[in-house]
Amino acid sequence: MANENNATPAAIRALIEGELATFLGAQKTYLQSIGSELTPASDALSSFLLDGGKRLRPLFAYFGFIGAGGTHSPEVIRACASLELLQACALIHDDLMDGSDTRRGKPAIHKHFEKLHSKESAVGSSVGFGQAAAILLGDLALVYSDLALHQSGIKANVLPQVLAVHDEMRVELMAGQFLDVYEQTRSSHTVERAMTIARYKSGKYTIERPLHFGASLATTDKDHLAQVTSHYSSYGLPLGEAFQLRDDLLGVFGDPDLTGKPAGDDLREGKRTVLVAMAQESMSAADIKEFESQFGKSDLDAKGIATLRQIITDSGAPEHVETLITNLTNTATQALDTTTITAEARQVLSELAIIATKRNL
Amino acid sequence: MANENNATPAAIRALIEGELATFLGAQKTYLQSIGSELTPASDALSSFLLDGGKRLRPLFAYFGFIGAGGTHSPEVIRACASLELLQACALIHDDLMDGSDTRRGKPAIHKHFEKLHSKESAVGSSVGFGQAAAILLGDLALVYSDLALHQSGIKANVLPQVLAVHDEMRVELMAGQFLDVYEQTRSSHTVERAMTIARYKSGKYTIERPLHFGASLATTDKDHLAQVTSHYSSYGLPLGEAFQLRDDLLGVFGDPDLTGKPAGDDLREGKRTVLVAMAQESMSAADIKEFESQFGKSDLDAKGIATLRQIITDSGAPEHVETLITNLTNTATQALDTTTITAEARQVLSELAIIATKRNL
């Protein structure tokens, strides 16, 4: 088992990857026992899950566990790894809904199955098959996240409280996703609404709730749990917002080699992010007109992207967002100044705050 | 609480509906606290869940519980009702994947949101919004099924074994759905493959696994649980096949007023059911050609449906399927001839066998 010397984010990430590989390998064997036709589904999910990703949610969960006084065990690694399966569901369904065809530099799941269908000259619509496969693979990943958690071997006395946090987190995620989809259908947008969506869809789900999940794995002492949970919210909520704001900037200005998405992908998809809402509040009338005529065009070319980027930059929003990220991250790390959270976790959570907001992956 | 006098399927169904309404009401309040924009999502899910349905899975689960020696409690009703939320996920995503626009005589969820988008002259694609809303509402229903189960108040000592059955059931369901979607892309079909798909997608999921789920709620005595589970498989597997075969017949020959689906819907969608696979094995060469030229055409008219129905009838398959249903149902009810299952449950399970295979809803 791990000792204090290897409880770095990198070491824990490696353990998480190992558990995910083991879990997916066992599930592949099981699905093959039902029918060999399921192998492409198993393979696609394994490839999707094991070929990349920062494992932020499992890491926050694990160090949330350590911070609440937990002692390392393989059972806890397995429980934390289950969050990555939930994230796979979110990404697979999100890419399908957004019509986002690339993920980590490779075809998104719906595109992968669409291409498979075309290559095999199979019967029916390739697009339809890709969509159906992505819906089902997302559903399967969601069910797998439960299965991985339930099979993790965590203690029965913490199970009910862990399930409660897990459920709340997932309802919030789906609610945030729905708000996001609904927002895209509106003709006017506000920074406030964009903030609410970002908080539910991404911020709470990525940082605050995984920390709570970890804490609920660590202790059944209600007072201690309540105290730790409260500190984690003070750290996790601002950090979650900072994380999402960084994501907004990367979606517009990020390097494709680092994001794994085409340049300016959010502009092509017309994502109504906090960054875009802030930019729109400070644009000139002429810029607003130009922006709205190009934003969300699926065939936007490099010139169009450069134009939209320039308008956003000219609005001053990116600078403002950078300042916000710095301030929110500072607020978050200051909330770690408490002995309620173990010293080991405090140190790592400070590092994770940097990783989550200065991300280059 | 219920006593022996009201433990009829109808009485239990009423209790299940009550628990579903209570659960969905509480969730609606919670979603409204996040944003009023979520009200259409809550309303659509409530309407979908409370306006119909035979509640077969909760009923089999409940009487599986009674049959394994369980004593009625509201907690168990709540746990069994959770299966209806899982079924909502399956139906919402299934209708979207099949392009099936009607459910219980009303627009399917994706159609409902597509129409809402059109009516409000909202920004973007109405079809895309309908699809995204259906994906997310299905996901939410899946998460709700967990939440309802976890919040049901069932005893902590049965929770792990209940979760294990629940997970297995859901993996089987998703695997069956995937096999089904894949089958539609093939150029040749066999009765055997259609049977495997029907077993996983529908049979096991509707009857055998809900019974196991109920048994796992009732007892932690491993020997007793293993015995009951085995009898439930002997009853549930053939009955599940009979149930699916009835569904195949209704999909082709059913009365729209009773099925809530347009006449011959399965023919228009080109569903590769066991019935269709059997019919194809006995068709003349001319009929095969005629059948394949019309089967799965989305604009199939009444005349086309009549032609396909006639070809299927002429193949002798419907008669053969009726005999199979009778034989499978007999095999199922004979498996109830054991004192391992309580007398009260045996009687109701006999009735449910009739309801599940002679269904007119």
Image: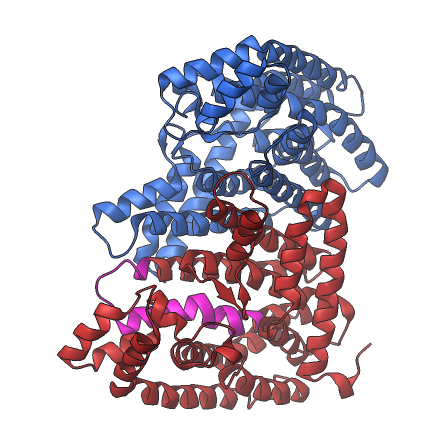
Chain colours: A blue, B red
The percent coordinates of residue B168 (x first, y second) are 51, 60
Q: Is residue B343 magenta?
A: no
Q: How many numbered tags mark residues here?
A: 0
Q: Is residue B153 visible?
A: no
Does A243 sit above or below residue B118?
above
Left or right: A128, with A198 as reference point: left
In front: B317, or A152? B317
Which quadrant holds residue A35? bottom left
The percent coordinates of residue B181 (x first, y second) are 36, 58
Does B125 sit above or below residue B86?
above
Q: Which residues are magenta?
A: B182-210
Does A333 sit above or below residue A61?
above
Q: Main secondary structure of the magenta part?
A: helix
Q: Is residue B201 magenta?
A: yes
Q: Is residue B278 visible?
A: yes
Figure quadrant of the C terminus of chain B: bottom right
Residue at 66 percent of width and 82 percent of height: B9
In the displayed image of the protein, which residue is found farthest to the right? A223
Left or right: B280, with A332 as reference point: left
In front: A90, or B305? B305
The percent coordinates of residue B77 (x first, y second) are 72, 70
Figure quadrant of the N terminus of chain B: bottom right
Residue at 38 percent of width and 53 percent of height: A29
The percent coordinates of residue A12 (x first, y second) are 55, 28
In front: A124, or A77? A124
Left or right: A273, with B148 as reference point: left
